[in-house]
Every structure is written in C-alpha cells, then in structure tokens.
Image (cartoon, rainbow, N blue to C red):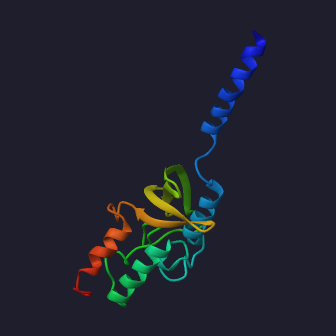
C-alpha cells in the first residue's frame, strides 16, 4: 500500500508547489515598480514627468511622445499630476508604495495592483498592466482614480482636443 501512495503523492505535491509559486517573475516586476515609484522617495522626485521615466512599453512610449508633441508646454488634465503618486505634492520621507497583487492575464502580460501613499497617510489604489519586452517587464497602461479608463485612453482623448482650451 505504501508503494502505491508514494508515487501518487509525488505528482500531487508537485502540482501543489507549482500552484503555490508566484505568478510571473515578481522580482523583475518589482524592479520596474521601483523605477516607477522609487523617485518619490526623494524631495526632487522623478526627473521630468512620470511619463518621461524609462518604464513604459515601446507602444506606450510612442503614444507618450505623440501626446507630448501635441500638447507642447500646455498643462492638461493628464499632465497636472504625477501618475505614479497620483499627486501634485508628496512627502518624500513618508512616501510608500506596495505591490498588493500580481496576476498573469496572458502569456507575457501581467496585472499588478499597487497601493500608493504620497506621504499623507491615505493610500490610493492603482492597477498596472505590464508586458514583457525582451528581458524587462514594462508598463503598458496604468489605471487609477485620476485615470479610471487608463492613461493610454486619457492620452488618446487629449489628442483629440485643442491644446490650451
């Protein structure tokens, strides 16, 4: 009886270990999150806007360049706040973010939920879609209270508007 139990238990144990393993490369995703959110831990914040950070997919980066050319120096709804802190001001010494979940939604594509506290004690929830490009996981879209349909949809909307009006 023991001989039959051991061979049957091995595949079951292996399946349980695979099911318990984190989805996707959490470490590589965390590197991208640190690049996106980490600069808020300094008083100067990110160089340029959040949209200037090297954390976006090639397709999103092309859309960002088009959006920036279209708007020039005009302040828009989307350029009036930091996308990753969802704020205009933050307290660097108290700024916090945490990855709440990581879920594979397709091969080479994950959904990450992040909680962000700009330093005032109130966490906001964000949802990011990351895509694997080469060896890196890059942000393809970001959904937040300020951009519930995603920053890509917001940029596309602003591209239909006359800047400064």
Q: Quadrant of residue 133?
A: bottom right
Q: Position of residue 49 (x, y in %)?
A: 47, 79
| Picture layout, residue 79 above or below residue 9 | below
Q: Position of residue 47 (x, y in %)?
A: 55, 82
Q: Position of residue 148 (x, y in %)?
A: 33, 60
Q: Position of residue 102 (x, y in %)?
A: 53, 50
| Picture layout, residue 27 above or below residue 140 | above
Residue depicted at 43% across the width and 80% down the height: 62
Left or right side of 21 for 148: left
Q: Nearer the viewer, residue 163 or 97?
A: 163
Q: Quadrant of residue 127?
A: bottom left
Left or right side of 96 for 62: left
Residue depicted at 50% across the width and 83% down the height: 48
Residue farthest along the top direction in this orientation: 1
Q: Quadrant of residue 125?
A: bottom left
Residue depicted at 54% across the width and 77% down the height: 46
Residue farthest along the right direction in this orientation: 3
Q: Nearer the viewer, residue 131 or 4?
A: 4
Q: Nearer the viewer, residue 32 or 63?
A: 63
Left or right side of 75 for 35: right
- In this rendering, does residue 129 appear at all? yes
Quarter of the image with the C terminus is bottom left
Q: Nearer the viewer, residue 126 or 8?
A: 8
């Amino acid at each position: 009886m023991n001989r039959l139990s051991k061979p049957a238990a091995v595949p079951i144990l292996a399946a349980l270990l695979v099911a318990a393993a984190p989805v996707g490369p959490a470490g590589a995703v965390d590197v991208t999150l640190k690049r996106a959110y980490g600069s808020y831990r300094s008083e100067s914040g990110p160089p340029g806007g959040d949209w200037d950070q090297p954390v976006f997919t090639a397709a999103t980066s092309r859309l960002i360049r088009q959006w920036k050319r279209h708007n020039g120096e005009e302040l828009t709804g989307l350029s009036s706040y930091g996308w990753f802190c969802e704020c205009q001001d933050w307290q660097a010494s108290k700024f916090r973010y945490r990855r709440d979940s990581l879920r594979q939604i397709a091969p080479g594509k994950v959904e990450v939920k992040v909680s962000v506290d700009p330093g005032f004690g109130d966490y906001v929830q964000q949802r990011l879609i990351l895509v694997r490009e080469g060896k890196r996981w890059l942000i393809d879209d970001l959904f937040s209270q300020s951009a519930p349909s995603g920053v890509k949809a917001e940029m596309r909307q602003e591209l239909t508007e006359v800047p400064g009006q």
